[in-house]
Each structure stands twice: as C-alpha cells, then as structure tokens.
Image: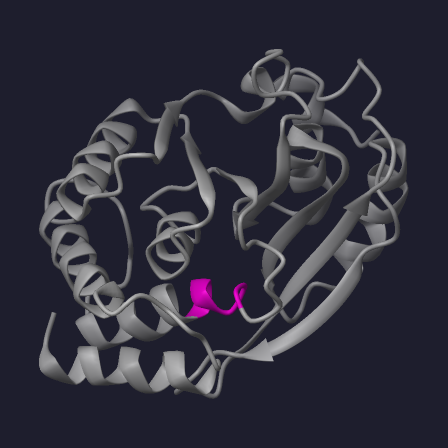
Amino acid sequence: MTEQALEILRQGLDRLGLTYPPDAVERLALYGDRLLEKNQVMNLTAITDPCEVARLHFLDSASLLPSKTLHGRKVIDVGTGGGFPGLVLKILDPSIQLTLLDSLGKRIDWLQEVCEELGLHDVVCLKGRAEETARQKTHREQYDVAVSRALASMPMLAELCIPYVKPGGLFLAMKSNKTDEEIEAAEPIIQTLGGDKPFVMDYQVPGTDIWHRIVTVAKPRPTPKAYPRKWTKIKESKI
C-alpha cells in the first residue's frame, strides 16, 4: 500500500482511540497489498484504490473495536468475502479467537494463505454455506459473537448469523445508515431466533463523511432447532 494509505490508517486508528500491536499497520499494509493483487484474478472487492481500501475496508471494519466487546472472545465472521471485518479485527486485536466463514472455496484458500503469511496461525478459515454450517454441532451456538458486514438484508442476516451465537452472546451486523425499515422488519425474526430488540449505533468512518451503523443483538435464549431454514425457504419467506 502507498505511504499515503498507511498514514490514513494510522490517523484513523488514532481517531478510533485504539490500542493495537506495533506491527498491526505493517500487517494491514501487507494484507491490503495481497487483496489488491488477488483482486485482479478474483472478485474480492470493488474498491481498488489503496487509500479507499484503508478507509472503507480497514477503518470501517476497525470501528467494531472501540466498544471492546470482541476482546478475548470467540468470534465467527459470517460471509467474510475478502476477510472483512474479521481479519482486520484479528490483526488489531490478536486476543480474538477468529473463524472466517465463506461459501467460496477459492476465497477461503486465499484467506488461509494470507493468514499464514501474516503469522495468524490460529485463525480458522472455513468453507461452508452459512445456513448449513449453523446446523453442525461444532458450530451451532459455539461462538461468543457472530459478525457480518453488508452480507444481506437484516431479516435474512439474522437467520443466517444468530444460530451461531451461544446464549449470552452477541450478533453484530455492520450496515449502512439507511436501514431503519429492514431493522424494524427483522425484530420479530430476531425474537424468534432467541435475540432481544436490536440496539443501533451510528458511526462516522474515520477520514470520511460516510456514516454507517452497528446493529447489536443480544441473545439471551437458544435458537429453536428449526432454524436456520434451508436457503430456498429463507429466500422465499420471512419467519
């Protein structure tokens, strides 16, 4: 990444008030380089300017960290794609026990290579469909926190992610700030899945005029065994 992109990263992380390892910016730079290299042959991101990668991928993902709800927690990033937000979170807070889940094997293979190059040997890179993997005993209600970034509308996202969260844990969805209606539509679904009423916090992406939001769902109750449903059912109708 360019020196300008690195300075954007440093300034943005300082604005977020984060404490992070001395080599974190260097690791993020290497991650960014590998992302843009691989993006030439694989669809990982529509953002190809290093400065915008720094702002709209790295600093946006890092905006989950100031609350410290992820520190030391077992976290699954559902539908991680190019590794957002999970891999950024792990680089900045190595105490996170991270699993990256994606349905595309080529993406998972690449993420595994990147994790090895970054020295993040404890990250689990897992290929699987979210609605199927959530039914496996080794993953169902086994995580303190499930995170996801712009994967689907909130009602669908809730059904795909909440089953991973153990009772007492959290689901964190990163959304645009124009999602009031879909969040309201998701409330009955979230309750059915064992979650409480969502808490919405808007934030400004450091170094930009862009506002996004974190939707936090606490999960006090287990998810009924019927959920998540098969993908065709999830697409066809609400719960």
From what the image shows, is residue 213 above or below residue 86? below
Q: Range of the magenta residues?
A: 60-65
Determine the image quadrant of residue 212. bottom right
- Residue drawn at the location 62% of the way across and 53% of the way down: 173
- Residue drawn at the location 86% of the way across and 48% of the way down: 187
Left or right relative to 68: residue 39: left
Left or right relative to 180: residue 116: left
Quadrant containing the N terminus in the rendered view: bottom left
Question: Residue 17's x, y, as percent?
Answer: 48, 82
User: Is 31 colored magenta in this rendering?
Assistant: no
Question: Residue 119's x, y, as percent?
Answer: 19, 44
How many numbered dots are placed on residues in this image?
Answer: 0
From what the image shows, is residue 26 above or below residue 166? below
Quadrant containing the C terminus in the rendered view: top right
Question: Who is closer to the viewer here, 212 or 122?
Answer: 122
Left or right relative to 204: residue 232: right
- Residue drawn at the location 26% of the way across and 42% of the way down: 120
From what the image shows, is residue 46 above or below residue 97? below
Question: Residue 102's x, y, as percent?
Answer: 41, 31
- Residue drawn at the location 81% of the way across and 25% of the way down: 223
